[in-house]
Amino acid sequence: MNSLRFAFIALACLVVGGLAGLVVAAAGKPSAPAPARFLPPPTAPPDFVLRDQNGHRMSPQDAHGSVLVMTFLYSTCRTLCPAQAQEIKNGVVKAGVKNVQVYGVSVDPVGDTQLNARRFLARAGLVDPRVHFLIGSRPQLAAVWRQYGIVPINASPQEAAAAAAAYDWQHGSAGSPGCPGTAAGEKQKGCADGRPPAAAEEPYPDTSDGRYRGLPRHGSWDFEHTAYVLVIDKHGRQRVGFPFEQLTAARLAEDIKTLSKQS
């Protein structure tokens, strides 16, 4: 499996993600379609080795025999990532199966320390031996991002460090909700302007240039990143993916249960 196919997956994810508003608008109608998802080639995803929140070396191969739910997030996020984690948690709980694991791959090599990763999982109620927040240096993570067509947070190391330092884990009071790492009332570059970058208007996005093109989720373009969930079966084959806007616990649970029963 090469990175070109995953670039196609990322492109499909972004295209489907652009339909999120239409899907949400139709959600209350009796004939509303099921949340959109994409079907990657049923082959093994690119392999990698990263350390989790407890320092253990992990790779997708370590999850063979279990259904693997993989996503991309960062630990000091206040909006998208906690919501994403809750949908995954609820999906795993609804599925009610034991042979499932969850990998959250970092998109912030500066702020995602082992301590911050453990704190994020604790706040999300995801302290479980089956859940791994995978972190690493920028070169280590960049190789994974490239293979999976991921755009990490668009913040400088200095901005990422400031956001992590300002985050109040006990009370969540540091910084304004949509602008990571900023004091209340202080406007961060690109914060909460509600407008996508110019690249979002391109008819055929180039997913290899490292520019984020999705919908605004965090309020600051400096902290936007690619967010989708990939489900890998017990034999290590990628089977289904959800752009975050289309992810629901019920649909994720359905896929986990189906794949856990397959021989």
Image (cartoon, rainbow, N blue to C red):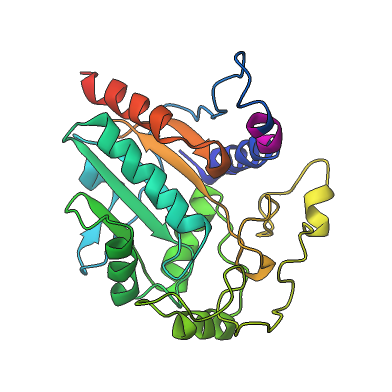
Q: Looking at the image, which residue is at 42% across and 28% down?
A: 251
Q: Residue furthest top?
A: 31
Q: Is residue 202 visible?
A: yes
Residue 250 in the image: above or below residue 226: above
Q: Position of residue 76 (x, y in %)?
A: 45, 71
Residue 234 appears in the rendering: no
In the rendered image, residue 24, in percent from the top left (x then y), is placed at 64, 33
The quarter of the rendered structure image containing the C terminus is top left
* Point 27% across, 68% down: residue: 118
Q: Quadrant of residue 14?
A: top right
Q: Is residue 20 rendered magenta in the image?
A: yes
State whether residue 53 is above or below residue 205: below
Q: Nearer the viewer, residue 194 or 257?
A: 194
Looking at the rendering, the stretch of residues picked out in magenta corresponds to 19-24
- Front residue of 257/122: it is 122
Q: Position of residue 137 (x, y in %)?
A: 41, 73
> Looking at the image, how many numbered discs can be counted on the residues?
0
The reply, left or right, for residue 32 in relation to residue 135 is: right
Question: Residue 159's image quarter?
Answer: bottom right
Q: Is residue 254 above or below residue 50?
A: above
Q: Position of residue 79 (x, y in %)?
A: 52, 60
Q: Is residue 33 left or right of residue 2?
A: right
- Residue 253 belongs to magenta span: no
Q: For residue 121, what is the image quadrant?
A: bottom left
Residue 84 versus residue 130: which sits nearer the camera? Answer: 84
Residue at screen point 55% across, 62% down: 152
Quadrant in which the N terminus appears: top left
The dominant secondary structure in magenta is: helix
